Image (tube, coloured by chain):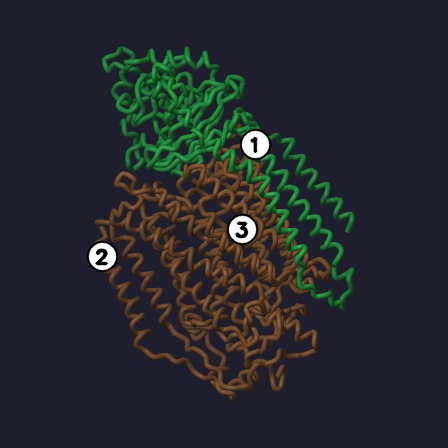
Chain colours: A brown, B green
Amino acid sequence: MSSYTQKKGFGATVWDYITTVDHKKLAVMYLLAGTLFFAIAGFEALLMRIQLMKPNNDFISAGFFNELLTMHGTTMLFLAATPLLFAFMNMLVPLQIGARDVAFPFLNSLGFWLFFLGAVFLHLSFFMGGAPDAGWTSYASLSLYSPGHGIDFYVLGLQISGAGTLISGLNFIVTIITMRAPGMTFMRMPLFTWTSMVSSSLILFAFPPLTIGLLMMLFDRMFGGNFFDHMMGGNTIIWEHLFWIFGHPEVYILVLPAFGLFSEIIPAFSRKRLFGYSSMVFATILIGFLGFMVWAHHMFTVGMGPTANAIFAVATMAIAVPTGMKVFNWILTIWGGSIKVTTPMLYALGFIPSFVAGGVTGVMQASAPLDYQLHDSYFIVAHFHYVIVGGIVTALFGSAHFYWPIFFNRMLNETLGKWTFWVFFIGFHLTFFLQHFLGLMGMPRRVFTYMDGQGWDQFNYISTVGAAMMGVGVIMMVINCLMSIKGKPAGRDPWGDGRTLEWSIPQPIPFYNFRQTPLVRGLDPWWIEKQEGNKEVTFAEPIGDIHMPNNSAIPFVISLGMFIAAFGALYNPDADKPWSIYVLIIGLAITFGAMITRSVKDDHGFHLHKEDILEIEEHLYGKGGNK
Amino acid sequence: MMKGLKKWRLFSLLAVMMVFLSGCGEDYLSTLKPSGEVGQQQLNLLLLTTVIMTLVVVVVSVIYLLAFVKYRRARVGENVIPKQVEGSHTLEVIWTVIPIILLLIIAVPVVTTTYKFADVAAMDEVDEEGNKTALTVNVTAKLYWWEFEYPNQGIVTAQELVVPTGEKVYFNLIAADVKHSFWIPAVGGKMDTNVENVNKFYLVFDKESQDLKDGVFYGKCAELCGPSHALMDFKVKTLSPDAFDAWVDAMKATEGQTADKASTDLGEATFANSCLGCHAISGSGAGGAPGPNLTTFGDRNRVAGFLEHNEESLKAWIKNPGEFKPGNLMMNAEGTAPIYGDLSDEEIEALATYIMGLSVEK
């Protein structure tokens, strides 16, 4: 028996996951970490909704409420939605393009560990003197004024996890450009791969402004840098621009892969190729491009002057056009198809009206003079939750059902899945629909309480009830996931309607993905093969040696060094903590030591020989099974 | 199936009715019941965009529901392989052009209104004698209160903005510590008070506020500014032009008004000892005080912007302001005690009576 087929003990499994560079295992780790932070941030939201359930409530204090709202937003966007989408990107992109791994498996692991340890660092703030409390936007005048180390946790934690995100984004771009199987031309790529590529490109251009902004904030808070201190000639508006130059594309970074996921689910369960594939690709690129031209619509009330406001208003409205193209293409994909209402499809069907509702309120807010009323009121809270929950979370839940068999070779329970959908979906609309009206009725956002007699009591109460329903829905979803551990193996293409390459691989997927690199003969290659009656995809090569990367603990060590150094940096300005400088030095020494080790040591990976492959396949699928 | 649909229709109808039944909010607070030209135009834009956008949602939903009902696999047949349509150029053009047209319909009023609202040229217009013709208010937002200075009249007040009806009132907005945002929902949209530069805009107040529930419009801080952001309310009293002029004169007449340490009134003496350093009680002069001007305190509507306006609240407030507005600057840096030290109950009692008696209208 070779080492590939041996069963591992618990310790060895943990070590395997810490050192792994396999995109599938990293996808699972992204999924678990993302779910953890999603649950934490969801819990924070529930606490806030309980506080706002009735007027003059004293369930939580004003200061803690601000910490909760900051961490809810920051966690949901950076530490829940991003890693969960990365889970799908990691799992699916190499499989969809017929690759055996990503272009830089080492960087893939590094990206995960930087993200994860940065996220852990940020969350430790709760136990170490208070979380950041200036909102996820952390506007400069307030964040500089904020006492304690909360904002320092925000700055350092996001800096580290942001580096992880940037590295991963870069990795996906290179993977998609260079690792496609023969015949997989750009215009034959599945739409999820397309949106992943455009989204990764957005990461590449959007994260550097954030990095710069955070660095300036770091200097301001730790060394008196005065970039944003107006008393010393600084300017807080610069932070707002830097933040939103990152922050608006961030929305598209998240929503484009969500569009991609639905563009996989809808054709599969309509049994029809995606309507207007090329215009979908074009719309994706256009959204990505326009996404960078509109950041200042978050700042209409800042006083940029009418010309800037008018330009950004019209540019923002323009985004509605490619987004509308996408919606109509999805509907036309359904039209004339054969719709099977599975749980993923249910999420896709719920997504269309919810997301359109979120999109149109976006156009309303793009109308600058109207936005003077809507900005920073509950209307905007309703709007972005319609987009994020209605667009991204439905995509994540639906895709979890859809791709569970790819991740774990198990199916999620369909009945429970449909119940979950209805509970979550009704709860979602109950929570956020009325918030539009709360905003119009004059309720500002980010308030920890409100007086009675302002006409807001009833809607706030209903909103809290809805939030509780969403919470129940999420718990049902988690139960469903846990139950699947005991489920039967799902096998290859369990939905029967798979269209793209990931469904063509026998389950469980071997760590090298494809025994032989497939030959792609058109859009939806697996569908084409199935239509021609083939049981296998066409191969581009005979069985031969496969070159695979070695596992490595170095990414973890590099990230751990950064994690330790961050504590040193955090406490460095405190006069009573002279040891902090040594923590900083030790941390950085670990990081640079690991980097040097990586540079000096040659690691050429290893070759998997034909005999090994046959042995592994026999172990996985039984003798002669599945060929 | 149809039964299910009917239920849904009933449900959505109920939802819509509920929204209308509960009204459009309160007329002193809601953007849906504007009392001024700016708010009215914003409401018009809201209605225009809502109509167009509802149209979009309805059209999309109808096509989508139709497709959904028509092409269920149960109806189409289990083994049917649908025609694999690539796309349609005609359709693509249609659903690109129609949204562009709809957006243009919105964009035209949006751009013109944007410029209109930003037109503050009249602020600097002067009459023959060189006096400014327009009423200007300098608003300074501070943690967590508002100062309103009338530079052309030479008066200053706080927490309760007093303005005349029927004319454009211009505002210079700035923040003294961290960024806030100045918002009177029922009168017009907000504008941020930045720390480094003055923002200018105007509002028009149509209705006299005395008929409203509390006799005032509600104003809000709309930008997260710290723990007590939610409590940083202010009120707006709108008066007829004549009444406003009378109010300005009454304010000017308080010039030199002060409290005497040697006063036999314990309240006045305590005020002079403990409060006068930050709180002026003369409405004449310029802004920039560390604490809200209290000249018109007795005429106001709330204590600290949000507490009920009576001596009980005022006493509780003076005793421990940090309990009501966490993070406010009447407390020392640690937030443990008021900066004016401990006052005896007797002193607080007298102080509350004294402060409540400060008025220019009574």
Amino acid on which the number 1 mark rests in the picture: Leu
Q: Secondary structure at mark 2?
A: loop
Which residue does the image show at 30% across and 76% down from the upper left? A600
Amino acid on which the number 3 mark rests in the picture: Ile
CB-based contact (under 8 Å), mark 1 and mark 3: no
Which residue does the image show at 30% across and 57% down from the upper left? A567
Q: Position of residue A379 (x, y in %)?
A: 53, 39
Q: Quadrant of residue A478?
A: bottom right
Q: Position of residue B262 (x, y in %)?
A: 23, 13
Mark 2 and mark 3: Cα distance apart in space: 43 Å
Q: Chain of mark 3?
A: A
Q: Nearer the viewer, residue B242 or A342?
A: B242
Mark 2 and mark 1: Cα distance apart in space: 59 Å
Q: Position of residue A199 (x, y in %)?
A: 49, 59
> Could you classify mark 2 by the number of other residues whose Cα lies within 10 Å: few (under 14), some (14-19), or many (20 or more)?
few
Marker disc for residue A388 = 3
Callout in the foreground (1, 3): 1
